[in-house]
Amino acid sequence: MATIAELVDVVVTSGGFPLLAGATVHIDDHEVTVLTGDNGAGKTSVLRVLAGLSPVTSGRAVVLGVDLMTTDRRLLRRRVGWLGHEGSLYDDLTVKENLTFAAGMTDRPTDAIASALDRVGLTSRQNTRTQQLSAGQRRRLGLAWLLIRRPALWLLDEPYASLDARGRDFLDDLLRDVVAAGAGVVVSSHDPLGHERFATRTVEMAGGRILGDEFA
Amino acid sequence: MMRVAWLVARKDLRIETRSRVLLWQVLPFGVIALILSGLAVGPNDEAMRHAAPGLFYLVILLVVLFMIGRGQAVESPAGTRTSVAMLGADPAGIFLGKTLALFVELVVTAAVLLTGVVVLLHAPVAGTASALPSVLLTLGALAAGGTLYGALVAGADVQATLLPIIALPPFAGLLIIGEKSFAAAVAGQSSVKWLLFLFVSLLAYLAVGILLYGVTEES
């Protein structure tokens, strides 16, 4: 196992309000790290820092070899996979058009789209506009995009929130495959029971700080 | 950069074609605004002909503000904004793509409005046709500037009211030059100096956009 991301005393502020107040955590490959805590604990803020989406006010943050204090954060984003809970890409494009657009923007071949759609169970909806998908299907679309990208670090923000039981099992299987292939996975969850089945490590957060770090 | 620009332009135009906002909202709005402007001038052919270039650009200005807001609305949902940011694409390419899409939409709108200018305001066909180069340059500069200003106000709670305040003062200069050029063409006079002004404005907006679009997106 090797460390692929490290945050040391990271402070992130927004409008003068501290979202992270000195968070220290490391992420290893071949591992599923679950961030737990109540709403507002700072889970999503940690994910956004790891994704290169939020600027770090102070501290040290190195993700996949990219020092976020000195390097353009956009360089990191192409190498990190993100699945948010808001939905993915453009509502007015179809599932397939969205994936084709994203592949083109990142110089990825479009050959992998069909197999990714098959894996997430969206082949029959590939010509459906994204706005007509259910929340769970949108989540699957986001996962299809991650399958095409195969990033070294997967960041999933409350990924189970809108999935049914079958979807949850599917995501568990997918994450096992991803971790077995060598990627690191970070999942945020406010559900203390839902993640025990696959987590190799649990990081507890509150008030923008790390309270505990336990290996399963 | 050009590949990203092409992909973004194609995506924006596909969304626009699908939503038909241009066809069912923007074009009817532009035509109605042009008719009302003509009515304000009164039933005087010479006065309407004289006012035609100015009225055309006044309506174009209203349409531009509408289209900028529309272009940003497509990118506004939180999930879309984050997903696109995570693509890590060249911001200069995104700027050029969005500018190209807005330019195409404005050209379609201008084609309809210029027809209206000839039919409703009795502008001469030959003079209007000779104004096309200046119209295209003005629309290009408006598209580039509009894309940049749209990104500046994107995500703001008061986007709809902030955009005109930011965009109208710099656009006023463009419209004055565009109107002078259009009027010169209609009168059969040389409009080379105005074309030069418009060309420099277009280049300036493109250069600033290519350099700063990424900064505005990140902020």
Image: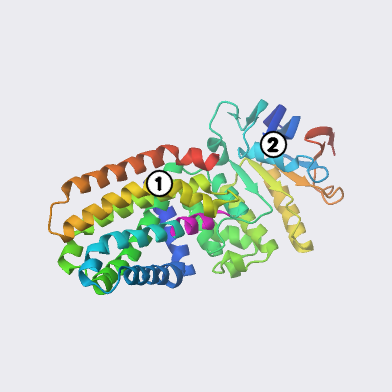
Q: Amino acid at mark 1?
A: Pro
Residue B36 vs A86, above or below: the answer is below
- Prevalent SS, magenta region: helix
The residue pinned by badge 1 equals B169
Residue B205 vs A27, above or below: the answer is below
Q: Are marks 1 and 2 in contact (CB under 8 Å)?
A: no
Magenta-span inclusion, residue B115: no
Q: Residue at x 44, y 38 (%)?
A: B212
| Number of residues whose C-alpha sits closer than 10 Å to that of mark 1, classed few (under 14), some (14–19) or many (20 or more) | few
Q: Residue at x 27, y 42 (%)?
A: B200
Measured as percent of width and height from the top left, residue B89 is found at: 48, 44
The quadrant of the rendering that contains the N terminus of chain A is: top right
Closer to us: B157 or A76: B157
Mark 2 residue element? loop
Closer to us: A67 or B128: B128
Range shown magenta: B67-76
